[in-house]
Image: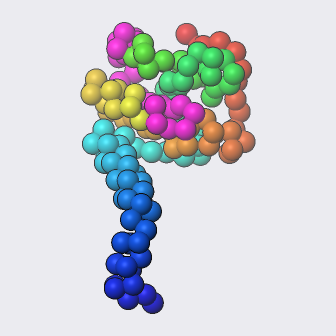
Amino acid sequence: MPRISEISEFAVRHWSLFLALAVVLVLLVGNEIQRWLRGLKRVGPAEAVRLINRRNAIILDVRTEGEFKEGHIPQARHLPPALLDEQVRKLEKYKDRPVVVYCRSGARSARVGGVLRKHGFAEVFNLDGGLSAWQSADLPVHRGSAKD
């Protein structure tokens, strides 16, 4: 087991590595704090399927139109983040239902999920890993245009 003095000496000699480590840790912790403050719950693909099948969850794809057409979760509604403010009014009728939001990896959907929570949506879930995780779980993907 290394002694404290050895660790300190290593840190002084390799300060740039320790700085990079600190930055990465701050970013990771900051991201988790933001999710917690937004009140978003993260769900994996299996839990998202349960929400869809058992609780009639609304699925929102917040990627670009091109990404959506390349492939999306069946029954997903396309909601580009740039149009969120005008489109959120159309979603008001679904406030009492769970909403699963996803993008490619989970970052954009976390931001949109936070906005939905601020607009009074009680149950907003972020698909952890986004469409990539959905596809990795061998779940179906639909290709084509948006659902109305």
Q: Is residue 68 left or right of residue 80?
A: right
Q: How many marks?
A: 0
Q: Is residue 30 left or right of residue 75?
A: left
Quadrant (top left/top right/bottom left/bottom right) for the N terminus = bottom left
Quadrant (top left/top right/bottom left/bottom right) for the C terminus = top right
Query: Vertically, is 124 above or below 32?
Result: above
Closer-to-camera residue (57/114): 114
The location of residue 25, given as percent across then percent down, is 38, 57
Closer-to-camera residue (74/68): 68
Residue 73 magenta-highlighted: no
Residue 106 magenta-highlighted: yes
The answer to which quarter of the image holds residue 50 is: top right
Please report the residue visible at 62 percent of the width from the left and 43 percent of the height from the top. Answer: 133
Please report the residue visible at 34 percent of the width from the left and 85 percent of the height from the top. Answer: 5
Q: Is residue 146 left or right of residue 138?
A: left
Q: Which residues are magenta?
A: 85-109
Please report the residue visible at 59 percent of the width from the left and 46 percent of the height from the top. Answer: 46
Residue 13 appears in view? yes
Please report the residue visible at 39 percent of the width from the left and 84 percent of the height from the top. Answer: 6
The location of residue 101, given as percent across then percent down, is 48, 31
The location of residue 48, given as percent across then percent down, is 54, 40
The answer to which quarter of the image holds residue 68 is: top right
The location of residue 125, given as percent across then percent down, is 43, 38
